[in-house]
Amino acid sequence: MGQTLRPTKFKDVDLSDKFFDSLKAQYQEFSDWFLKKAAEPVYVIDDDGGKGIRGFLYIKVETGEIIDVQPPLPAKRRLKVGTLKVNAKGTKLGERIIKRIFDHAILEDVSEIYVTVFDTHASLINLFKRYGFEQKGVKTTPNGEELVLLRSFETLANDIVKDYPLMQTSGKSKWLLAIKPEFHTDLLPDSILKTEDRASEADVPHTNSIHKVYIAGLSLNRMKRGDLVVIYRTTDIQGKAYYRSVATSVCVVEETYARKYFKDADAFVAFAKDHSVFGEQQLRDRYADGKPLYIAKLTYNAAFVKRPNRGALLDIGITTQPKWDLRALSDAQFSSILELGKVDASLPPRTHSRSSVSTTF
């Protein structure tokens, strides 16, 4: 399967696909609006086998006052999601789309995201609210009344999930956490390397999710909720770590556990299955093997634009060995890695007043 969210243009999307029937029914002007957008970019999620459409996402930047909602929103740089629909089929595609919206919000340096959504879409509203959207008003149209949900990128709610992808860095411990290459892209698809096969990005829950479960034999309990974690992909060619072991992404620790936390294999599988690279039987076998077992749940906040290799890390004083798993970083080392990785400086929150991001489904 190819990339989950495929960029294209409105004119290259089949408006007659049955996927759009519900949108046409809910918004009487939908077809005319769609045709007027012919040259504009959009994301499409193809159904299995490429036959038909499974998801659709349209987002744009706005800068003016929003006067068609009550109360009106003052002029500000916002991201609006004009249309979003997805048939998730039990996977985490909703999370994947939320992540892509946030990626664009950071890239476009917006203050807010906003979305209008009918209150009948309870699961969608809950998804937005989980990631920090708050109801700020209503929008009344001939189609009915929609809720206005907004998300700020200027201050923190001091909640790891509601603040996502922003990171609270002050006073938090920082870590370098290794992951083997055979698991890396499967767990962290936005951090794929140029040497890896993009077709390996399968549409399964752990690939699409914002939340990741890392399973190891070494103790992860040194990491605490809110700690920052740089993911380090170890070399795929023995003896080439200097060039091929690379830092690829940054995550935030949600929670860490040892085997004893889970009362039985069923509890362990239920916790890990949607967010781990391992299948259910592999998880059961791992729980039962008697070897040390530790689990970290992380939010996947940003993929690096540049991937500093072991050589670059050595240059900034991180004396890694080719084979290691968890290593503490100083604040200065962490900042240097983010700078080398060209992670957007807005990921740590800005200091001015809170604002929102606008996204519409």
Image (spheres, rainbow, N blue to C red):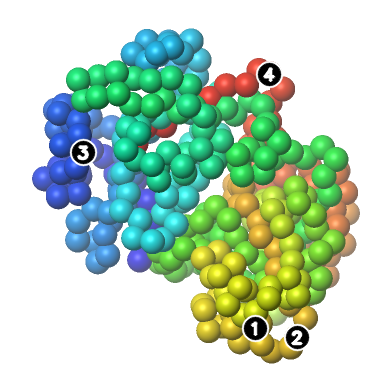
Disc 3 to disc 1, C-alpha distance = 45 Å
Which amino acid type is shown beneath numbered disc 1? Arg
- Of badges 1 and 4, the one in the foreground is 1
Answer above or below: position of 244 versus 247.
below
Which numbered disc, 2 or 3, marks the residue that appears first in the sequence?
Answer: 3
User: Which quarter of the picture shows residue 202?
Assistant: bottom left
Q: Residue at x 74, y 88 (%)?
A: 290
User: Cβ–Cβ below 8 Å for labels 1 and 2?
Assistant: yes
Q: Position of residue 259 (x, y in %)?
A: 73, 75
Dot 2: element = loop
User: Which quarter of the picture shows residue 327?
Assistant: bottom right
- Of badges 3 and 4, the one in the foreground is 3
Which numbered disc, 1 or 4, marks the residue that appears first in the sequence?
Answer: 1
Which numbered disc, 1 or 2, marks the residue that appears first in the sequence?
Answer: 1
Which amino acid type is shown beneath numbered disc 4? His
Disc 2 target residue: 291
Disc 4 target residue: 352
Disc 2 to disc 3, C-alpha distance = 52 Å
Q: Looking at the image, which residue sits at the far bottom?
A: 289
Disc 1 to disc 2, C-alpha distance = 8 Å
Answer above or below: position of 56 versus 62.
below
Which amino acid type is shown beneath numbered disc 2? Lys
Q: Position of residue 150 (x, y in %)?
A: 49, 27
Disc 1 target residue: 286
Which amino acid type is shown beneath numbered disc 3? Leu
Dot 3: element = helix
Q: Position of residue 346 (x, y in %)?
A: 65, 32
Answer above or below: position of 316 versus 257.
above
Disc 1 to disc 4, C-alpha distance = 47 Å
Question: On the rendered image, what quadrant is the C terminus found in?
Answer: top left
From the viewer's perspective, tell me whether residue 348 is left or right of residue 145.
right
Disc 3 target residue: 23
